[in-house]
Image (cartoon, rainbow, N blue to C red):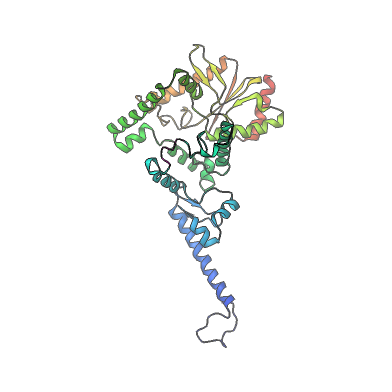
Amino acid sequence: MCGADISHLYRTSHFCSDECYNKHLQIKKDEKLKEDIKESHKVHTDPYKYIECGVCGFRGGDITSHILKIHKMKTDEYKKTYNVTTTLSQERKDALSERMKGDKNPGYNHGGRLSPFSKNFVGYNEVEDKEEVIKELKKKAVVTKVENNNNPLTTEYYTSRGHSLEKAKEFISERQSTFSLEKCIEKHGENEGVKVWEARQEKWQNTLNSKPIEEIREINKKKGNNGKSSVAAITFFNNLIKELSHYDIKKQDCIFNDGEKQFTEKYLLKGDNQTFYFYDFCHEPSKLIIEFNGKYFHPNPDKDNWGKIKTNRSLHHLSKEEQSQVTYEKDQDKISTAKSNGYHIEVIWDDEIPDVEEYANKLYNLISKRI
């Protein structure tokens, strides 16, 4: 292998030394690994079904043994080195979770005793302010999930695994439609699918109606018209606040979901004194509002999502095109309500997120003119 003269060695010898032989083996292993990596990229194309090795790029549903066997690293060492939290694909984790659901889980009906997110957690017996501990834990969980790109509902989850931004948005759109009327019909057939979907919605409504009127009002207030903010919106607004701080614009003057609150506090009452509209971001001193719209939930005639929005529970009797029209008109009414209350409103789309630095400069100029 190294070109050394081995004529003086035994006639079946192929290597001049053990070192030369070991180098030969390593070359063969490296060649095989390259082939395995290449093949794994052909087989695994769906980020939901694979996780990629941070050392070599090998893809698999579970790379635990690969890391130990090929790279001689223990799982904990690998996680710490590459700042990841798992060596399993999302599909594999979901499968493991399914195996432990309901009465198959040893902790079934544990009443919160085994969950650190519950006040009944056994580890909180000596803790006085349990709510504060749980609040901090939830905050840390959200931040960690975003920072490690482990949220399959963010584009970073897919782009960090080698997919284009457009492909990432397709994957997100597919995952967000897991329980729509369309999905139920696809799975159960038209007649049965509608029944399954309506039964789910009725169960949800009955659960809500069974609560005390005060609690129902609080839930509806928190939900507003749009539900909770997306991870993409939370991330964008947190980054925006950091940039705005360079212009001496303070966070306490802005109302938005920063990942700690469960809902946006800024809301405006329409002229009929019955309709509340909640807004994603508001700089109150300048009366400036920003709406962060997801293309999958907010139809727009100028985009390619008309007739393709997520099925609305209250509009399921309408066609997709009719739902788009009703939802679009509601969005326009929301904008008009803000303007009629003296607010300037900006709209950002999740498929056209602007550069944060440039957008912060734009907002600074707007705010300066309005104060």
Q: Nearer the viewer, residue 128 or 142?
A: 128
Residue 139 part of the magenta segment? no
Reply yes or no: does residue 110 show up in magenta.
yes
Quarter the N terminus occupies: bottom right
Q: Write the residue at 51% across / 20% down.
A: 277
Residue 160, image x, y percentages: 54, 47
Q: Nearer the viewer, residue 216 or 271?
A: 216
In front of the other: 209 or 164: 209
Residue furthest left in the image: 191
Outermost residue toward the front? 126
Say which residue appears at 55% left-offset and 61% top-offset: 71
Q: Is residue 38 above or below residue 248?
A: below
Residue at position x 55%, y 17% from top? 268
Location of the C terminus (image quadrant): top right
Q: Which residues are magenta?
A: 107-111
Q: Name the magenta segment's main secondary structure.
A: loop
Q: Is residue 235 above or below residue 51?
A: above
Numbered-mark total: 0
Q: Is residue 319 visible?
A: no
